[in-house]
Amino acid sequence: MYLLGYDIGSSSVKASLVNAETGKCVSSAFFPKTEAAIIAVKPGWAEQNPESWWENLKLATQAVMTESGANAGEIKAIGISYQMHGLVCVDKDQNVLRPSIIWCDSRAVPYGQKAFETLGEENCLSHLLNSPGNFTASKLAWIKENDPAIYERIHKIMLPGDYIAMKLSGEICTTVSGLSEGMFWDFKNNRVADFLMDYYGFDKSLIADIKPTFSEQGRVNTAAAKELGLKEGTPITYRAGDQPNNALSLNVFNPGEIASTAGTSGVVYGVNGEVNYDPKSRVNTFAHVNHTDEQTRLGVLLCINGTGILNSWVKRTIAPEGISYNEMNVLASQAPIGSAGISILPFGNGAERMLENKEINCSIRGLNFNLHGKQHIVRAAQEGIVFSFKYGIDIMEGMGIPVQKIHAGHANMFLSSIFRDTLAGVTGAVIELYDTDGSVGAAKGAGIGAGIYKDNNEAFATLEKLDVIEPNQAKRQEYADAYARWKHRLEKSMAK
């Protein structure tokens, strides 16, 4: 018995086939093999053709079925993870009307900001838990104003995962979690956000039918079964955006539990058990995968743009030529905690929401030409990334999320012992590293939705824990002093 999970990313589409009994991934594949193209007609724009997601999904499905030798009839459920905040528009015949405006497209910022100011900041935050910002609703407002002929033909709007489910089943539906990430959900009244829909002039018929995150959301139809080599009637029983799904993949479901990633950018995603928001809108809050009317489970998302991208820049431009990341970590270990007074503010990858959308750029503070070498800069870069996590975690704790344990995949910056030890030391949290990914998580989510697993604990009972990092109590003060110095320098920079 197998479960099939898809992860629809902006760089590739990945499929994983999971043995439901053992919980092990038996085959996985991703396409394209080079990073998927993003259409950027103008600066700040980012679009992709949804049809390309489907074509890559077909290739990935065929690859895992061939490699595993599994019988399509043995696949009992399908789960979908997807890039968040994208907008897909289809007509009554389910034809895509225009390329999808994806998550990193910034053209809708002025629309969201105007809505925030016109509707009232407190009103938006108390109902949406966020500013309308650059999210899906604001992207639709851009289309309405700038491409009215297309807007008039829209039958339904969808997120990328909703589109894939439609291609699989022919049915159009969505989830509360999905609507919340698009700013279409009113948490105060537990319904579609009528006040924002009315403000933008959207007809309520554009919103798809709402299904629970863990439930039957359609079945593979004849056409999709033929294209993919799957069995007609296979149920789709789970879908979620990539960050809620990453938390699910790490078995993060309950208040106080934290999931983190640290690739090019960094994410800290915490679960809150009560409706709350940051009054400065420095973090985003969406419905988590297990949020219901009866059980409040909100995912508080902190995103930091300048994480692994800083580390790679240091590797290219400062570290000795030809050095590996592991050798960089060895070099950094030659410097003491606090990098002998150097602080690096790692914000050189655009405006940071955590810093109230200020773009302060990256800077090195406290550099002494007679004292510091490459090892200090390499270490200070990693410490600066960790301290930016700590700064955001303080915001989350102010919202009532106690950060005591951080779940993460054993990848990217979490491969560095300096990064891990500094994060544990400065936050006081235990870090647990796991072997998992989004498509495997989506497959297990499908198992929960199909009733194959009774709950998340059964679904993730076989999740492999690779390492546990405990805070070094003897060095807590050293980490605290280094962070205090870094924070002081950050606040001075922001005050300019």
Image (spheres, rainbow, N blue to C red):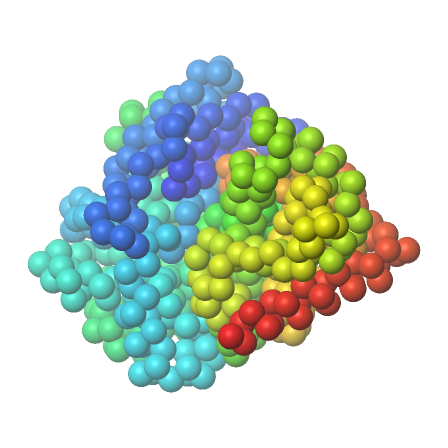
Residue 312's place in the image compared with 324, above or below, is below
Q: Would you say residue 214 is visible in this rendering?
A: no
Q: Nearer the viewer, residue 450 or 480?
A: 480
Q: Nearer the viewer, residue 86 or 367?
A: 367
Residue 417's place in the image compared with 151, above or below, is above
Q: Quadrant of residue 391?
A: bottom right
Q: Nearer the viewer, residue 286 or 479?
A: 479
Image quadrant where one finds the N terminus: top right
Residue 311's place in the image compared with 157, above or below, is above
Q: Which residue occupies 52% across, 49% down? A: 265
Name of the residue lying farthest toward the left: 149
Q: Which residue occupies 19% across, 61% down? A: 143
Q: Is residue 19 left or right of residue 8?
A: right
Q: Which residue occupies 21% across, 69% down? A: 203
Name of the residue lying farthest toward the right: 474
Where in the figure is residue 496, as x and y percent of width and height? 51, 75
